[in-house]
Amino acid sequence: MNTPQAIAQRLLDVRRTQVPLTDSGCDVASRDDAYAIQDLTLAALGPARAWKVGAKTLQSEPTCAPLPAVGVLASGAHLTGPGWRLRGIEVELAVCFGRDLTGDAAHDPLQVMQAIDAALPAIEVVESRLGDWRKDKPLAGLADLQSHGALVLGAPVPWPAGGIDLRTLRATLTFDGTTIADLQGAHPTGELAPLLVWLAAHCERRGMPLRAGDVVTTGTCTGMPFAPPGARVQGTVQGVGTVDLRF
């Protein structure tokens, strides 16, 4: 059966066995079911330390996933073992909230943006529990914590008074010192506020409101190149900082 409970268990089994699911094993019926599967996965993996949110365009509805604390790591992390088969790399801008966004505050765009306390450079490592991850199966990917592998965070810096404009933000990515991407304004939406405002309201309705200290990563600024085995990966977000990891 493809109930949320059954699919969540299959996705958890992949994390143990490293045998990806077939298409029929992750046939998710709806967006609500995908989020229910996320909740069941999180219940098994441990509490969320961060969130990811993104959208393909400014006009499309965002999607999100809670990120288990076990996979949120500090810059310099070494990622080892068979779980890193894809090694998709996204350099991103992450933000940290300085106060809780509960009740009415979660639905007030001004309060959401004023709650941002810090910016961080981030690398999200993209991994999939799906066998044919190249297929366009958005609900399956959403259920699979939006293909989350790990989130590696650099040092936070104070959030600037004028905010950060994704339309002009420059980000670079290197593998073993070789530049793979050096892009400006490459974020898919170019707008930070709509993503964070949508996420705050979504999390409140879902019963997992954003809290002080929560980190949110907001989408790739460098595309998604794939790192070779054993690579040292470094990302830089201009004006924010540098973050690195090694496989």
Image (cartoon, rainbow, N blue to C red):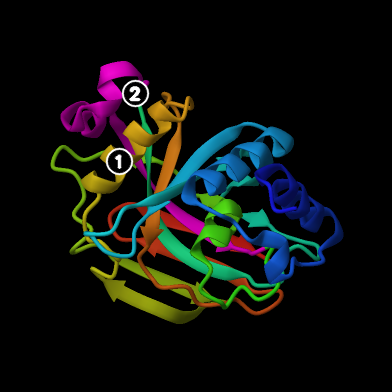
Residue 229 seen from this side: yes
Q: Answer left or right for 7 relative to 223.
A: right
> Magenta span has 206?
no
**Residue 179's image quarter?**
bottom left
Q: Is disc 2 surrounded by few (<14), some (14 to 19) or many (20+) residues within 10 Å? A: many
Q: Amino acid at mark 2?
A: Leu
Give the residue drawn at x 55%, y 35%.
49
**Residue 159's image quarter?**
top left
Please say if 70 is above or below 188: above
Q: Which residues are magenta?
A: 100-128
Q: Which residue is mark 1?
A: 198
Q: Is disc 1 surrounded by few (<14), some (14 to 19) or many (20+) residues within 10 Å? A: some
Cα separation between marks 1 and 2: 12 Å
Please say if 17 is above or below 160: below
Give the residue drawn at x 46%, y 30%.
206
Identity of the residue furthest to the left in this view = 162
Give the residue drawn at x 44%, y 48%.
64
Could you say whether the residue bearing mark 1 is in a helix, strand or loop? helix
Residue 123 appears at what percent x and percent y? Answer: 50, 58
> Magenta span has 123?
yes
Q: Which residue is mark 2?
A: 101
Identity of the residue furthest to the top in this view = 103
Give the residue drawn at x 75%, y 53%.
1
Quadrant for the C terminus in the image: bottom right
